[in-house]
Amino acid sequence: MSATAAPPVKNRQLYIDGAWCEAASGKKLAVTNPATEETIAEVSFGGRADCARAIAAAAEAMKSWMKLTAYDRAKVLKKTADLMRERADAIAKTMTMEQGKTIVESKAEVLHSADTFEWFAEEGKRAYGQVIPPSNPAKRHLIIKHPVGVVGAIGPWNFPITLQVRKIAPALAAGCTIVCKPASQTPLCLIGVFECLIDAGLPKGVANLVIGSASEISDEFMSNPVVRKISFTGSTEVGKRLMRQAADQVKRLSLELGGHAPFIVFPDADPEVVAKAAVIGKFRNNGQVCISPSRFFVHKDVHKRFMEVAVAEAEKLKLGNGLDEGVAVGPMFEKKAMDNTLALINDATGKGAKCVTGGKRSTKFEKGYFFEPTILSGLTQDANILTEEPFAPVMPVLDFSKIDDVIAAANNTKYGLAAYVFTNDLSVAWKMAEGLEAGIIGLNDPVPATPQCPFGGMKESGIGRELAHEGLEAYLETKYVSIMLRG
């Protein structure tokens, strides 16, 4: 497939009440390939009226969907997973063309998301209640689970399938129906997922896709009383705004927001092995990952060797169009992201940091948002990159000598999504697991996310958890039933 070819999805429209349809306004939106800066498709671009229609369809569909057994709902989810695996190559190509990540990363995202569908197909069968022993012999007490209602799901561009499927799969498994709002820049690969859902036998109205204005769609989600839950992945700033809006109707919220993950290397860890893992973890998807390691604390005893290996590995990374063989790093998502990256680097170096490698837009490409993998050393504590979520291919490396000092430095942020620790000392590992303020901690594990384990953050990184049993509970209400027996 050439860089300018149309992505391999069939549809370019909204999906509402079981049908592909144009936006009520007739508006279209161009989707751009960040590797070529060329338009690869036009999609329907909806607004508030389209969202309201989708919500109404979801409400009507829920009447029958919630009455199906968890086993019947599971059949649809498992079939969807199977179809995603069969179509993984095509969906991955679409994702790479509109988002920029390498084809290897895109396919891994599709397969991970298929696993999420399959896992929740099974977990939906375990929405257990309780029988509680009574204190009054004439009573019986029961706890039962009930789907929360119609869900409004808002996802970002960096993982356009994974971060929507983490909402769609548990919502549908719990008996809810859903209206999905993808990032306007990356709607095509999610269309591919909806094609799988449809072909898996999803009843009309159960899942709806509205591409369109973020402000109009979110306003409809927040003001429409039919929508009982919002699940949002994105910036902390927008998450706070949704929290304020949700107060008017006391809507339930799941928020997965910003992150600023520390990556901590102790002297007993092999600095060469860890440095290679650090480079892979940092520069996948150009650091445009909410749990990406973004502050590297390396013990002074292994700091020099770590830096030598990290620089060598970073300079080996091949930049290019994500569809091309051998490419390790694709383009950044948009020009604005490159400008923000350069601003962070200039701020750090202006305050005394040294740019060891990278540090600028690549000159190897006539078009595309390609930025060199960058490593900084000698940072001062007032560098913006140590406090602002970078979302950039930049590795700022600091040293440390005392465990209590590095815990304090790692926790010195408003975020608390993920943290990474590399050590072979069990006592150190346990102290770090207890001391770090993060919802996800990878001990010698640079890629901890998996469908069966909870995903989410502390502090301003969000509210609630996705994945695991907690991810199913997020779409269920708890009902207490007390029964007085006849004498």
Image (spheres, rainbow, N blue to C red):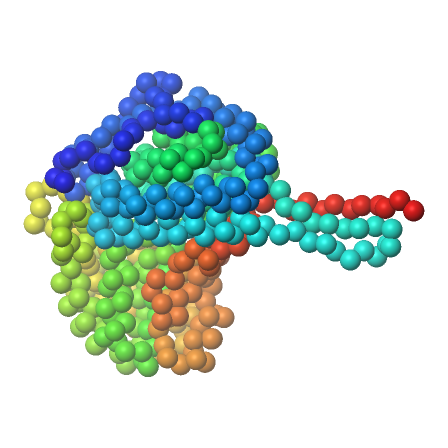
Q: Residue at x 36, y 77 (%)?
A: 423
386 sits to left or right of 6: right
Q: Residue at x 59, y 50 (%)?
A: 127
Task: From the top left corner, tell me how far across and down residue 443 is, in percent.
Answer: 39, 70
Q: Quadrant of residue 476?
A: top right
Residue farthest to the top, as pictured: 25
The total of numbered circles placed on residues is: 0
244 sits to left or right of 354: right
Front residue (pair 418, 103): 103
386 sits to left or right of 232: left
Residue 263 appears anywhere in the view:
yes
Q: Is residue 481 above or below residue 458?
A: above
Q: Is residue 165 above or below residue 379?
A: above
Task: From the top left corner, tell me how far across and down residue 392 is, in percent.
Answer: 26, 52
Q: Residue at x 51, y 25 (%)?
A: 56
Front residue (pair 44, 143): 143
Residue 251 appears anywhere in the view:
no
Task: From the top left corner, tell me how far across and down residue 123 is, in percent.
Answer: 52, 52
Q: Residue at x 32, y 26 (%)?
A: 13
Quadrant where the image shows the N terminus: top left
Task: From the top left corner, tell me how far across and down residue 357 is, in percent.
Answer: 15, 62
